[in-house]
Image (cartoon, rainbow, N blue to C red):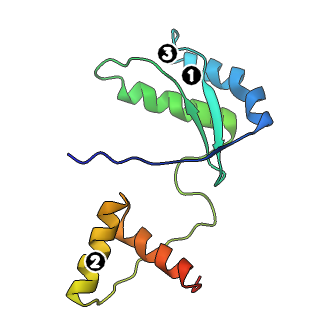
Amino acid sequence: MTKRAQWIEVVPDAGLREQEAQATAAFRRFFPKAPALKLYRTSDGRVGFQAQMLLAAGDKARLEQAYAAVMKVLGQRRGRPGGERKVQAKLRLHEPVYRALQEAAQSSHTTLSAVVEDLARKAHLV
């Protein structure tokens, strides 16, 4: 099994510190003994939270509900950020080019689409 790491850059956000108590209260409606949540904002504008706790088997549905409650407090929605429209494309590539892109995607722990997108940005096509 391949483990995938996702790196994020956290930026300071004083407004989130003020919302931590409300977010923690919303989370504790589902997990009363949960520790205080730590809210963060990434450099690309996404908002998230950190909670360290043990979950029992079968707690996934309750965790999803707790997550939704916290995001409602923060005024955030789940999913792709607005304005970031993706378009499906079909490319006809020579076999060696396709293999090279696949290897680049595997070594960088991303998708083939992300590699192509990065190459387009570096070539100043975007």
Residue 83 lies, with reference to residue 65, above or below; the image says: below
Residue 87 visible in the shown view: no
Q: Check disc 1 and give the amino acid type.
A: Phe
Q: Are marks 3 and 2 in contact (CB under 8 Å)?
A: no
Which of these two is toward me, 124 or 30?
124
Residue 108 lies, with reference to residue 36, above or below; the image says: below
Q: Are marks 1 and 2 in contact (CB under 8 Å)?
A: no
Residue 83 visible in the shown view: yes
Q: Residue 69: image x %, image y %?
A: 58, 30
Between the C-alphas of marks 1 and 3, the distance is 6 Å
Mark toward the viewer: 1 or 2: 2
Question: Which residue has dot 1 on it?
Answer: 27
Q: Residue at x 55, y 14 (%)?
A: 35
Question: Which residue has dot 2 on it?
Answer: 100
Q: Residue at x 28, y 71 (%)?
A: 102
Question: Which residue has dot 3 on it?
Answer: 31
Q: Identify the element where label 2 is drawn.
A: helix
